[in-house]
Image (cartoon, rainbow, N blue to C red):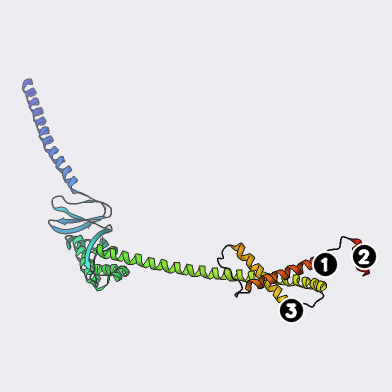
Amino acid sequence: MEESITYLSYNSIDLIDSKERKMDFLILPIIIILIVLIFFSIVIVPQQSMSIIERLGKFNRILSPGLHFKIPIIERVAGKESIRIRQLDVPVETKTQDNVFVNLGVSVQFIAVSEKIFDAFYKLTDVNTQITSYVYDVVRGEVPKKTLDEVFETKDDIAQTIKDDLSESMDNFGYQIIKSLITDIDPDPNVKDAMNQINATARLRVAAQNEAEADKIRQVKNAEADAEAKKLQGQGVAQQRAAIIDGFKESISDLKEVTGAEVKTQDVMNMVMMVQYFDALRDIGTTGQNNAVLIPYGAGGSNEIMKQMTEAMIVADQIQTKSEPDSDPEKNIEESEN
């Protein structure tokens, strides 16, 4: 009896162990499946981005940045749309009104509007291609209406036109145009060389004009300085002549005392002219910048000069003899008695 009871107890224990082992085999896969489902249900949306969730192939909702959950297998992340400001550089080649080929660099800054993510994601396959097409259309419609110089002068107006047309078109697709810029205007190399030559010629012309103005100013200043110098020189000559006249007064007084004769005005003028003549000869000899000498014209000119010089020397000796006291006192007494 005891052996039967022991046998039954062993059998029951084995049965319980087998059931526990079967439960372990069932729970482990369930846990793994749950972990996998939870993993695939987690959706993390980065900052400045938005995710589009589709349920069984149909749009369901839009997820903002942060942690979210979706139903595995039934729901999926169809895609992400950045809401950062993006920039697209578009090179455009076109021709101006004056038949000059020019390459323009256009930069467009745009952003997907948060409230219109559905349109931005589903209405456009490639936003860059769409914007590039619009930029080509606007630039090739505006630039041929202007000359090359006008393109340089009105590049901001062209950029504003691009922005206005793009804003009107891209707003329907969920995008906002922030800014449009003309970053580069590059004409044909031959035209560029010609423009550089024209600019260089213009600069040379301006430099020549400035040099002419400077030379004119220098000439005016030199003329003013020369006039001032002549004025001062005239004052010096006048003072010199006044001193000569004063000296002549004394000489004429001495001459009257010696000769007792009346001195005429013409004689005084001749003496003045003679002094000025000798001064002129002295200046010619000392200056060194003169290569010509003026002498009285005529055959008797030299004799006249010699005669005047001789008379002047005789008069000077008489004045000197009169002014000096006699060294012999007895001779002086006899002359006084006579």
Direction from residue 55 to residue 220 in the image, left or right = right
Residue type pointed to by label 2: Ile
- The reply to whether residue 167 is in sight is yes
**Front residue of this view, candidates 214 and 68:** 214
Direction from residue 219 to residue 244 in the image, left or right = right
Q: Is the C terminus in the top left, top right, bottom left or bottom right quadrant?
A: bottom right
Q: Is the N terminus in the top left, top right, bottom left or bottom right quadrant?
A: top left
Residue type pointed to by label 3: Thr
Of the numbered discs 1 and 3, the one sitting upstream in the chain is 3
CA gap between label 1 and label 3 equals 23 Å
Residue marked by disc 2: 333
CA gap between label 3 and label 2 equals 38 Å
Residue 271 percent coordinates (x, y): 71, 73
At numbered mark 2, what does the secondary structure look like: helix, strand or loop?
Answer: helix
Residue 149 percent coordinates (x, y): 30, 70
Residue 156 percent coordinates (x, y): 31, 68
Badge 3: few (under 14), some or many (20 or more) residues near its Cα, within 10 Å? few
Residue type pointed to by label 1: Lys
Query: Disc 2 or disc 1, which is closer to the eye?
Result: 2
Give the label on residue 265, or none: 3
Of the numbered discs 3 and 2, the one sitting upstream in the chain is 3
Residue drawn 11% across and 38% down? 26
Q: Which residue lies furthest to the right in this view?
A: 337
**Image position of 60 with respect to 319: above or below:** above
Where is residue 36, by image quadrant?
A: top left
Circles 1 and 3 in contact, beta carbons < 8 Å: no
Direction from residue 171 to residue 281 in the image, left or right = right
**Front residue of this view, candidates 192 and 144:** 192
Badge 1: few (under 14), some or many (20 or more) residues near its Cα, within 10 Å? some
Give the label on residue 146, or none: none
Give the label on residue 322, or none: 1
